[in-house]
Image (cartoon, helix red, strand yellow):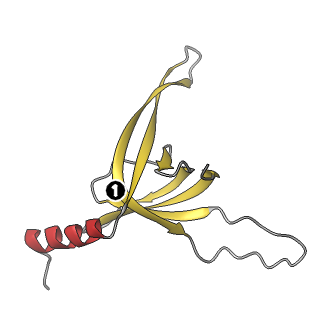
Amino acid sequence: MTYLTDTDLADMRAAQADAMPDTFTVIHRTTAADGAGGTTVSGCTTSTYTGRIREARGDERPDPARVTEFSRYKLTLQHDAAISASDTVLDSAGASYRVLFVDDKKSWKTALRCDVELLRSRS
């Protein structure tokens, strides 16, 4: 069985980075105890990463009587991005997305894939 070397992995990450032309800002909400056993949003921090986004496939709704807006996307970020399903992502054109799922359970991470949903389209 052949495994990837550190050099192989670095080369693959560099190739992935070259294919990520866009910039995304990840908004991480911070919470604090609300005194009643729950939490409330107390602020946020941000991180900026290179990445790429595309419409997800396979969510067709064949109904000729109405038009359904497509809002699911696949976001690819650099392998070491800090992101979770409670975060919001902004692209450089002003669109915002809710992170639904982060696929971070890979043996050799060359990029990080996330399922996101469009919240607000570009201005």
Residue occupied by mark 1: 50
Q: Using the image, determine if residue 35 lies above or below residue 116.
A: above
Residue 97 location in percent, x, y? 55, 51
Task: Please identify the quarter of the rendering in which residue 52 is found.
Answer: bottom left
Task: Classify 10 Å Cα crowding around label 1: few (below 14), some (14-19), many (20 and above).
Answer: some
Q: Amino acid at mark 1?
A: Thr
**In the displayed structure, does residue 1 sit left or right of residue 61?**
left
Query: Is residue 107 left or right of 64 when viewed as pictured?
Result: left
Residue 30 x/y as whole percent: 45, 29
Secondary element under disc 1, as helix, strand or loop, is strand
Q: Reply above or below: 56 against 75.
A: below
What residue appears at the point 20 percent right and 68 percent down from the top-left corner? 14
Give percent across and percent down for residue 26: 43, 45
Name which residue lies at 77% across and 67% down: 68
Residue 66 in view, yes or no: yes
* Quarter of the figure that contains the N terminus: bottom left
Decide: is 2 above or below 85.
below
Nearest the eye: 52 or 111 = 52
Q: How many marks?
A: 1
Of residue 13 and residue 102, the one placed in the foreground of this image is 13
Q: Residue at x 65, y 61 (%)?
A: 71
Q: Residue placed farthest to the top in the image?
A: 35
What's the residue at 59%, 16% (across, down)? 36
